[in-house]
Amino acid sequence: MRVAFVSFETASHRDTETNHRFQTALELLASHGHDVHCYCAKFWAGETSTLEQDGITYHGVVTGLEARRSFLVRLPFVLAAAAPDIVHTRAQPSAAVLAASWGATLARAPLVVEWYGDGGIDNDRWIQLAAKRGARLVTPSELVATWVRERGADGELIETIPNPVDLERIQDVPPGEQVDVIYARRLDEAANLESLLLALAELRDRDWQTTVIGDGPERAMYERLASDLRIDDRISFAGDCSLEERIAAYRGAHVFAQTAEHCVFPTEMLWALASGCVGIVEYHVDSSAHELVEGWDRGFRTTSEAELADAILAAGDLEHRTFDDRFADYDRSAVAEAYLEQYRTLEEAYGLL
């Protein structure tokens, strides 16, 4: 299958959550033997307009991120000439959705629009126009699906496809040191680590150890808070860690606590749950993390520090695990198949099969 991905900005331009999500989709399709092309602003040196990398062909429609208008003008004609089976575009910038829609029409190919929403989704006229484009709209969670419907999208066209994890890779990493509670996220203004620290302070008369993975501008503040609460001797701030180091830590931990105020998909929590952790989520209106633990006997949803502390105690009665096959539907192969199933359905509907 020949798939034309449209992403004005890529993970090679900026390492953001949204860019990484879209890059993962490219890599999943390429790893399954499909003919994957990405139409973007050029990010590589040299005169050549294309770059072959890891089974993906990148096409520099324009040079540099300053040429957005030229990208929008050229894109429809470039897509028409490429004759793809599927056009798959990200939703930002919203004007690119309209250009990709025109290009898909010229190419007589179905259009898939990927909505992620890291940082939220605006509700201006361009967003509303973009929300009405696409034969299929893909979101990472029900939270983002709700946002897209509120911008005018047809809910019948929305499919939720999660971020993937690699279950084989998890099983290949030996468990690390055993700790009771682990937290992992960039320590910025939305991390809300204070909720966990306050809950742990309520349990200071209990025997527990906690690891905090991640770095960021608020790390020093959180370290001071742990000291002020007189629990800093039982909390290890590990800083940034590689994926292998994080998996080992998750396989050694008993509980993963998710308290961030904004999260369109809790990828790090998913790695931890698949690594055997019990999941405790503090509910926030702009976070989808609770969706992973709803209806699960090893998951807790809380709304306050007191409830979070009670959940940590209750989790202590559950067995320690180093792997959980309940999350097989989130494996890379399963997520790739979810994308392919949407493509095949659209090809059939368009009479392309």
Image: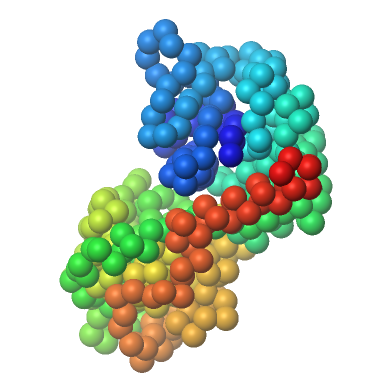
On the image, the x and y values in percent for residue 14 come to 44, 32
On the image, the x and y values in percent for residue 123 come to 74, 42
Vertical side of 28 occupied by 266: above or below: below
Count of all numbered marks drawn on residues in the image: 0
* Depth order, front residue of 64/77: 77
Q: Quadrant of residue 130?
A: top right
Is 8 situated left or right of 46 in this image?
right
On the image, the x and y values in percent for residue 325 come to 41, 74
Residue under the image location 35 percent in, 46 percent down: 217
Is 78 situated left or right of 166 in this image?
right
Residue under the image location 66 percent in, 37 percent down: 86
Q: Residue furthest front?
A: 353
* Depth order, front residue of 265/213: 265
The colour scheme of the drawn protein is: rainbow
* Depth order, front residue of 35/326: 35
* Depth order, front residue of 142/280: 142
Where does the C terminus fall, quadrant-wise?
A: top right
Tell me if I can see residue 113 in this picture: yes
Vertical side of 80 occupied by 252: above or below: below
Where does the N terminus fall, quadrant-wise?
A: top right
Tell me if I can see residue 230 in this picture: no
Residue under the image location 38 percent in, 51 percent down: 186
Q: Quadrant of residue 107?
A: top right
Q: Residue furthest top?
A: 47
Residue under the image location 38 percent in, 34 percent down: 54
Is 68 situated left or right of 30 in this image?
right
Vertical side of 147 occupied by 231: above or below: below
